[in-house]
Amino acid sequence: MEVFLIFPKSQQANQELAQELAKFQSEQVLKSVQKLPCSTEQKLELVDAAVKHLKKRK
């Protein structure tokens, strides 16, 4: 399989790509969390902990 990547040339297009990628990644994480075999409360705690961790890194 061959994959060709064409990266944006402008700063605005690069920012849009980064925003779309972040949106996609967050949707994939939420899907993974929803599939976990634990209670909704535990899932919410996990998501909250992840958000707090990411905010600390900034």
Image (spheres, grey):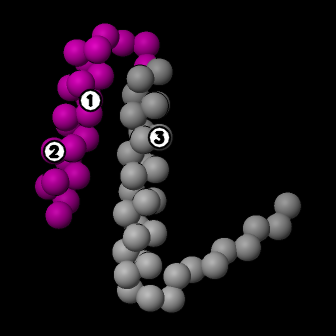
Magenta region: 36-58
Which amino acid, mark 2?
A: Lys
Question: For the C terminus, which image quadrant?
Answer: bottom left
Q: CA distance from mark 2 to mark 1?
A: 10 Å
The numbered disc on residue 34 is: none
Q: Secondary structure at mark 3?
A: helix
Q: Nearer the viewer, mark 3 or mark 2?
A: 3
Q: Residue at x 76, y 68 (%)?
A: 3
Q: CA distance from mark 3 to mark 2?
A: 18 Å
Q: Do tag 2 and tag 1 residues touch (Cβ < 8 Å)?
A: no
Q: Main secondary structure of the magenta part?
A: helix
Which amino acid, mark 1?
A: Leu
Question: Against 14, is 17 above or below?
Answer: above
Q: Which residue is mark 3?
A: 28
Residue 44's spot in the image, x, y percent? 24, 24
Q: Do tag 1 and tag 3 residues touch (Cβ < 8 Å)?
A: no
Residue 17's spot in the image, x, y percent? 45, 69
Q: CA distance from mark 1 to mark 3?
A: 15 Å
Q: Residue at x 21, y 26 (%)?
A: 45
Residue 43 as seen in the image, left or right of residue 45: right
* 54 in the magenta segment: yes
The numbered disc on residue 46 is: 1
Which amino acid, mark 3?
A: Gln
Q: Residue at x 29, y 22 (%)?
A: 43
Q: Earlier in the sequence, mark 3 or mark 2?
A: 3
Q: Earlier in the sequence, mark 2 or mark 1?
A: 1
Q: Quadrant of residue 10?
A: bottom left
Q: Which residue is mark 2?
A: 52
Residue 36 as seen in the image, left or right of residue 50: right
Q: Nearer the viewer, residue 26 or 12?
A: 12
